[in-house]
Amino acid sequence: MAKSILLINGVNLNLLGTREPHLYGSTTLLQVVERAQQQAKSLSIQLEAIQSNHEGIIIDRIHEARGKIDAIVINPGAFTHTSVALRDALLGVEIPFVEVHVTNIHKREPFRHHSYLSDKAEAVICGLGVYGYTAAIEYAAKHLKPKSKAQ
Ligand SMILES: O=C(O)[C@]1(O)C=C(c2cccc(Sc3ccccc3)c2)[C@@H](O)[C@H](O)C1
């Protein structure tokens, strides 16, 4: 099963917990990452976390993960609904991934209902608040195995 997980948070998620708490809750991204690290330690897995507002930086980090990371947990933020490039990067590195959304995107504005990633995700978790990250990491650690290592 996955021994190394890359947790990716995309655009605007640095604002998590600071604005619109009725939608996104009051837990900050720092707290989410701290909890994820504690969870990873309890599962004996390595976890690295990044957040970026820049699509290309996220894509570069996904490329770097090829052959090194066993699974990805990603909340792309608004890139979910816009980024074919992010989809292509995830498909290109052949690393299984879980898509996470703090909110239930299907209960929000119509433009949030479509994801460029969901049909390729091993699992999609949305609407569970920040617990979605916990569930995603647990699932990835116990059910996802690395695809063939990079040549
Ligand atoms: O629910 C999510 O986790 C989501 O991925 C997260 C999003 C998100 C993340 C951070 C900020 C914002 S918008 C915002 C801007 C300022 C203050 C509060 C929220 C949206 C949305 O863009 C997505 O449609 C849904």
Image: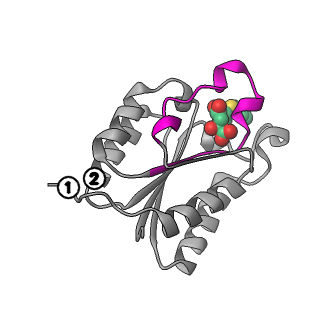
The residue wearing badge 1 is 150
Q: Are marks 2 and 1 in contact (CB under 8 Å)?
A: yes
Find out whether residue 112 is within the magenta segment: yes
Q: Quadrant of residue 42?
A: bottom right
Classify 151 as above or below 118. Answer: below
Q: CA distance from mark 2 to mark 1?
A: 6 Å
Find out whether residue 83 is within the magenta segment: no
Residue 118 rendering spot, x and y as whole percentages? 53, 37
Classify 110 as above or below 7. Answer: above
Using a 10 Å C-alpha cutoff, classify the residue at mark 2 as few (fewer than 14 neighbours), some (14 to 19) or many (20 or more): many
Residue type at mark 1? Ala
Q: Which residues are magenta?
A: 97-120
Q: Quadrant of residue 92?
A: top left
Classify 58 as above or below 6. Answer: above
- Location of the N terminus by quadrant is bottom left
For the residue labelled by badge 1, is the local secondary structure a helix, a strand or a loop? Answer: loop
Residue 39 rendering spot, x and y as whole percentages? 60, 72
Q: Residue at x 35, y 33 (%)?
A: 88
- Location of the C terminus by quadrant is bottom left
Q: Residue at x 49, y 44 (%)?
A: 121
Classify 107 as above or below 14. Answer: above
Residue type at mark 2? Arg
Using a 10 Å C-alpha cutoff, classify the residue at mark 1 as few (fewer than 14 neighbours), some (14 to 19) or many (20 or more): few
Q: Residue at x 46, y 74 (%)?
A: 45
Residue 107 rendering spot, x and y as whole percentages? 77, 30
- Farthest-out residue, left: 151
- Farthest-out residue, right: 22
Q: Nearer the viewer, residue 21 or 122?
A: 122
The residue wearing badge 2 is 66
